[in-house]
Image (cartoon, rainbow, N blue to C red):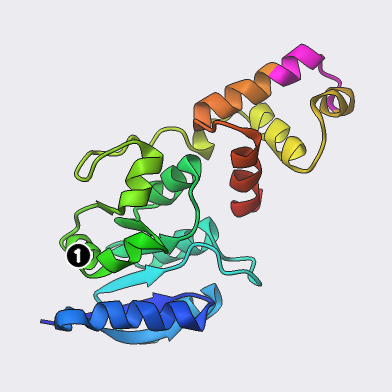
Amino acid sequence: MAYRVIIADDHPVVLKGIGLALARNGVARVAGEADSPEALLELLETTACDALITDFSMPGSDRDGLAMLQAVRSRYPRLPVMVITTIANPALYREILSMGVLGLIGKSGDARDIPEALREIVAHHVYLGASVQAVLGVEQGTVVDRSGTLADLSPRELEILRLFAAGHGVTDIARATGRGLSTVSQQKTNAMRKLRLANDNEVFEYIERLRL
């Protein structure tokens, strides 16, 4: 049986590549393609499918990333979803998985695993690509710890990360918020520890990708 799959990505070449991977050995056929979150949600309303394979970030829309996944999950809670992404950020991976996404693979080397990943998610098993496993420090079949997400931050810790990612230094943030320098520094450290982010670049990517 060939699974019916909807695919979404803003790059035509990627859509073509996913379609070719799905056609391998007749494992699936493309039921529809979308190049934006809005087009994806419209397509899901009119097209029956067994699974969704989507990019995480599709620029040009305010509904990409987690907002898109939240919309899909709220409307189609039983639909198996796989995300294919260039992101390599552990906190972002945990945010994606916390949305009920079953498959998470990288766009580079992991993409060849699409047919295997599809079989797993349709059976409602979690599938992580090799590059995702490496970033998370887990092995295939391991239950991923879903803690270390936005929900674990206090409002003040999130505020500090937002200001920091916007280009403000710790001293400027302390002055703007009326808090002590050591307090602001500790709140930033606590937020990074909770999210398990190793450096400032990961903080910048996390805040930018989540549109915080």
Specify the farthest residue to the front: 109
Residue 110: % across, % down: 33, 60
For label 1, the SS is helix
Q: Quadrant of residue 142?
A: top left
From the image, tell me which residue sits under label 1.
116
Give 28 or 42, whichever is nearer the viewer.
28
Specify the farthest residue to the left: 1
The segment highlighted magenta reads: 177-185
Indicate whether 49 appears above or below 194: below
Q: Is residue 178 magenta?
A: yes
The secondary structure that dominates the magenta segment is helix
Residue 185: % across, % down: 72, 19
Name the residue at 46% across, 58% down.
Answer: 70
Give 16 or 142, whichever is nearer the viewer.
16
60 on left or right of 80 = right
Name the residue at 64% across, 40% down.
Answer: 201
Residue 36: % across, % down: 54, 76
How many circles with numbers are drawn on the protein?
A: 1
